[in-house]
Amino acid sequence: MRFAYMTGVTLSALLLVVFVGALLFIHYVRRQRENSLSRFGNLELLAKISDTIILSKRRWKNILLVAALLLLVITLARPQMGASVAPIKRKGVDIVFAVDTSLSMLAEDLKPNRLEVAKGEIGNFIGLLKGDRVGLVAFAGSAFVQCPLTLDYQAAKMFLDVIDTEIIPVKGTALGEAIRKASEAFNQQEKKYKVLILLTDGEDHGAKPLPAAEAAAKEGIIIYTIGLGSENGEPIPEYDENGSKIGYKKDKQGEVVLTKLDVTTLQKIALMTGGKFYQALDNSLELNKIYEEISKLEKKELSSKLYTLYQDRYQYPLFLVILLLLIEYMLDERSKKKKAWGGRFE
């Protein structure tokens, strides 16, 4: 016998507390009844001129109520008995998000900025997963694995929350390095079940992303690219130590630097690996479409565990609760006094 909602020791302590509490309550009610009746006269005299209370029946009614209360506590603890062992398998693919954390991701053509929109959409995407492993790679001028592949989605979201533009000390945007580092995060023995989702404005700074994408394709990695920002260019805001905007980033000539989306490069990366390119518009990163694409892919068995399934037995104490309450309700504690016949003209 086990209980789903508490241990045996906890249940025993709770039953003791309930039992003692019920006895104290019954005693309190009895004293209150006696005090109320005493206001009308002598208790013995009142008992003689009123209906007789059979004390033994009243005790039995109290016993039935207390027993029903204790059984109700046991019912709520959800007793279980008997068990069967069933294997539960989890299937899915490995998904790695590579997130651009360069300063250009602070551009505000997506509100509040490109990076925050990307993080929010990734968090929503992770919430949709039901069996796939997920990992994170942060990159700017270099790249590193922020979160290894895991089935712990809450842990992945925690790693996602701390990503910002200061997490990579090397400035710039190294798309090729991001692809190579993400490729290392996958199982090197497999040639499928691998998906890389690359979120960036696509402005690569000499990291040779196309050769990296070609190498990834040979490893069976499908890359979906999401372009963040505008092809026309957007200024990069700068902030002081207090987080207040103080202007926009400028080059050595004093001209405002514009960050432009490199659609062509991102389209080529996706095409080389069998993926697709999506451009973020109006804060929508099209990740729901990528999720639909991934759900159609062949999946591998990621884990298989044996779970013990216990059979609920709360019905039995619940039946006894109902039975005891019915008996208590039907048990009459009063015995009517029979009035002596005083003649036909009484």
Image: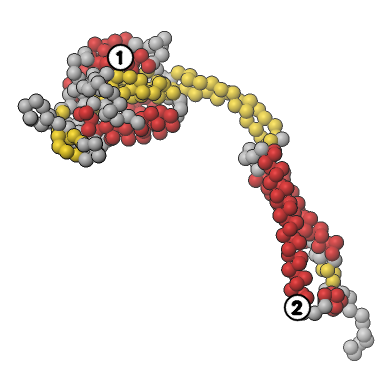
Distance Cα–Cα, label 1 vs label 2: 92 Å
Residue for point 77% across, 55% down = 64
Tell me if 309 is positioned left or right of 302 in this view: right
Counting from the top left corner in percent of width and height, residue 239 is at 20, 36
Colour style of the rendered protein structure: secondary structure
Farthest front residue in view: 241
Above or below, 284 against 330 in this view is above
Q: Residues within 10 Å of mark 2 (few under 14, many from 20)?
A: few
Mark 1 Cα-neighbour bin, 10 Å: few <14, some 14–19, many ≥20: some
Secondary structure beneath label 1: helix
Name the residue beneath numbered marker 1.
180
Number of marks: 2
* Residue at image location 40% in from the left, 21% down from the top: 148
Q: Is residue 300 left or right of residue 73?
A: left
Residue labelled with disc 2:
39
Q: Nearer the viewer, residue 318 or 7?
A: 7
Question: Considering the numbered disc 2 on the image, is that residue within a helix, a strand or a loop?
Answer: loop
Among the two numbered marks 1 and 2 on one chain, the one whose residue lies closer to the N terminus: 2
In the picture, the quarter occupied by the N terminus is top right
Q: Check disc 1 and give the amino acid type.
A: Arg
Marks 1 and 2: which is nearer the front? Answer: 2
Is residue 198 among the parts visible in the rendering?
no
